[in-house]
Amino acid sequence: KLCGYLNKLGIKGPIKTWKSRWFFYDENKCRLLYYRTAQDINPLGSIDLSSASFDCKMEIGEGVFEIRTPSRAFILKAISKQAMMYWLQQLQMRRWEFCNTQSRFPVGSSQLVNEPLAGRTSRYFLPLVKTPTEAVGLKAASLPAPQTSTALQNISLKHPWTEIQNTVYNICGSKQLWGNNENVFSFDEFQEHPENVDKEQEAEVEAGCAVKEETLEDGRMGPRLNWIRKARWMNSGFPGSEELLREKNSVDKVSVLQQQILTLTEEVKSQKELVKLLHKALEAAQQEKRVSSMYLTAAEDKDRLELVRHKVRQIADLTSRLEALEQEKKELEQILTLRDSHIQELKEHVQLLMEKNHAKQEVIMTLTEQMARELSDPLQEANTITVETLYKQQEEIEHLKDDIDAYKTQNQFLNSEIHQVTRLWTSVAENEKALLMKCACLQARNCQMESKYLTVLRKLQEAVPGLPNSHAELVKNLIQEALQWDVKEEAEEGFNLNPVSEYDEYGFMTVPDYEIEDWKLLAKIQALEIKSNKLRSQEIVEKPLRDRWNSIGELNPSAELKSLIRSGIPVEHRQRVWKWMVSRHCSPVPGHYQRLLEQSRSTEHPACRQIELDLPRTLTNNKHFSSPTSQLIPKLRRVLLAFSWHNPAIGYCQGLNRLAAVALLVLEDEESAFWCLVYIVENLMPADYYSDTLITSQVDQRVFKDFLSEKLPRLMAHFEQYRIDVSLITFNWFLVAFVDSLVSDILLRVWDAFLYEGTKVIFRYALAIFKYNEEEILRIHDSVEIYQYLRFFTRMITDGRKLMNIAFNDLNPFPMKLLRNRRSMHREELETELCQLEQIKAAYVKERAEQGPQDLKEVVSEEEEES
């Protein structure tokens, strides 16, 4: 058992005093209980060690240490430095054992349990301190408690009721002992079996500790156990009981008995003070009881009224006495103030006299030293001064050595404390991380279940026309309830691990706001899928990827960087990487953007009207562009006008507004967004991609159909069977790089790879989108339904990792050289077809020009004939 006497600093109020307390460690709850004496049954308080830290206070005094809990700091003092270090090391070890045996840490940290403070042999930590048996442990319980200067100083005024309970318990036990034993100091039993004294004392202390633990739970003990405990304590509690058996000298026996008498006398004094307090409380209670009894036993109301009047007179009398006492108190305070001022004057006078006396003594000492120097030998005087100086320096050196030793001890202990607390914190952090991952997996699974449930509701919603009215109404109610889940969860749950907000980091809506009522359930399913994917990939994929990005310093083209960019750039790194990719191929010209703005302000561009028409239609699902008063609308206007002046061959084409808007969202600076738009149009995209004829855009659609036939032949055959023109859907994908087609998170990942690798990324992702939904499309056997599905099926893609793996891994890759060859071939074919169309058109116009007047003449003549 870890127990013993320590002095505890009481700091309640302005008075700070050391009070002796018996401390006992409770292994079950990792608490340090403290009592006034070792024989008390109820603790005065407890210290929770499970979350406490320890520190030794060398600067306060020897043996002083501190236990700091989250709510309070306890300052304790041991009888020696060795006892202090023993307590600190034992408390550290007990805290470590408790924290690791409560199964609060992951399995991987169990190996730390077998390495407590006892296993540390490093020179930075303290070796184990031997147990000071005279101050700590079972034998210390049989010794008398350390005495204080006054009898009442050691009593806890903060816990009067506990003190009264312990005192009554001890008095009752003492009376039983005196009644059953005529002589308390009878040693016959010990003389018969002197060899069993130490064993009985240890057994009694262990029983006493066990009794404390049991009392904390049930609060009662049998009278037989009380009598045995108190009898053994009275016989073993005297420090001289064993010595009296061994001492032969009667003088030693008398001195021991006198010491016992003094100890008991001090104890009796403290008990008498408490008995007086109890007597006064009892008398007041009895007086109140008598008055109440007289009032209740009064036969008539007149007698009761007289008792009440008597009580009122008593109250008035007490009130007057209280006022008189308060007046007397004020007078005494005034007298005390006057006396304090008088004492202060006397102190000042005494101080002046002492200063005069000190000055006179200094003068006398100076004269004496002067006379001594004149009379003594100069060499002897120098030797005397040297010896005195050397002696003082030696004393200072000894003091400094003691201070160094003390601070070394303190430093070693603090190193061990920091080491253990750090490992405990690491274990807690690992456990918290494991719990968060488990919670994220559970939430992801819950989102999947909700998504499946909503999918079933959506299937039922499509089948509502064929259901009975009662079933249709039930389905409608279930759908309405499902759409309100988010509102209920926000109101009921105060904690959410990964809440899905209304907008993401760039301002895109996380849940699409579909105008069609039937599609709102579809939007709900999409939001749940997004949340589920984020939760599943947060710790497994996103965190390792973010760590790899954090380890990258200067950006240089490499296979590793290419792989990282394909996986997606984290939000905190995307702006820096985009600026680097733009600056690699398109060096910004200083002042060029400002000159273009000046030109746009001075001269109106022909495309200005079309730009103003397209601004309100730009990224309507983003809060930064949804309102005409949004801050990014003026920036977008300036970027588009500057580009129209920068590239007169293109000027402005519908679709450039979306490209510039995405660049603004990520890069934030409008000049950087302008150069990003220049980089996309003039470097990444082929020439004539945004010209009036859009000839290169049409070429890419033919190239894509070729790739679609090669990579997904079943799907292409399905489209041909139902005469589906895929270019009606995909043309806009290529023109604006999937803006307004994909979910924002997947869209930005596509753009990451697109800005680094070029337009082949658009082909890869376009094929991957059809592969992702191939089976769903093949199940549709109606051309109208296929077109309706293709209108919104890209918004249903929520797993960006799966789409990326399809784009770059599952589909056989095609080199950029193959893409260029296909483009050249189809461009020649398209140009030939356009030339043939131009020739047919010219011939038709020429023919119409030649035949036009004749036909008109014939028509007129026919009308004339009819008339």
Image (cartoon, grey):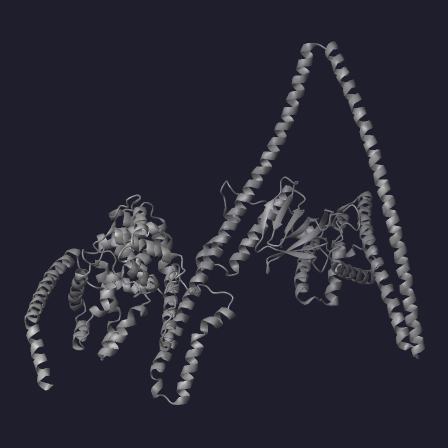
Q: Position of residue 541 (x, y in %)?
A: 35, 59
- Please, is residue 745 above or below residue 129 in the view? below
The answer to whether residue 39 of the structure is visible from this angle is yes
Up/down of 392 relative to 125, above or below: above
- Residue at image x 9%, y 63%? 835
Q: Quadrant of the N terminus?
A: bottom right
> Most extreme residue toward the bottom, as rendered?
468
Q: Between 710 and 655, which is closer to the camera in this rendering?
A: 655
Could you tell me if residue 562 is visible in this image? no
Q: Nearer the viewer, residue 480 or 45?
A: 480
In percent of width and height, residue 380 lies at 69, 12
Q: Position of residue 6 (x, y in %)?
A: 68, 49
* Percent position of residue 103, x then y: 50, 61
Residue 287, image quadrant: bottom right
Figure label count: 0
Q: Nearer the viewer, residue 261 or 721?
A: 721
State which quarter of the image contains the C terminus: bottom left
Seen in the image, is 119 located left or right of residue 151? left
Q: Nearer the viewer, residue 604 or 849?
A: 849
Rendered image quadrant of residue 59: top right
Q: Quadrant of residue 98?
A: bottom right
Residue ID at (21%, 64%): 811
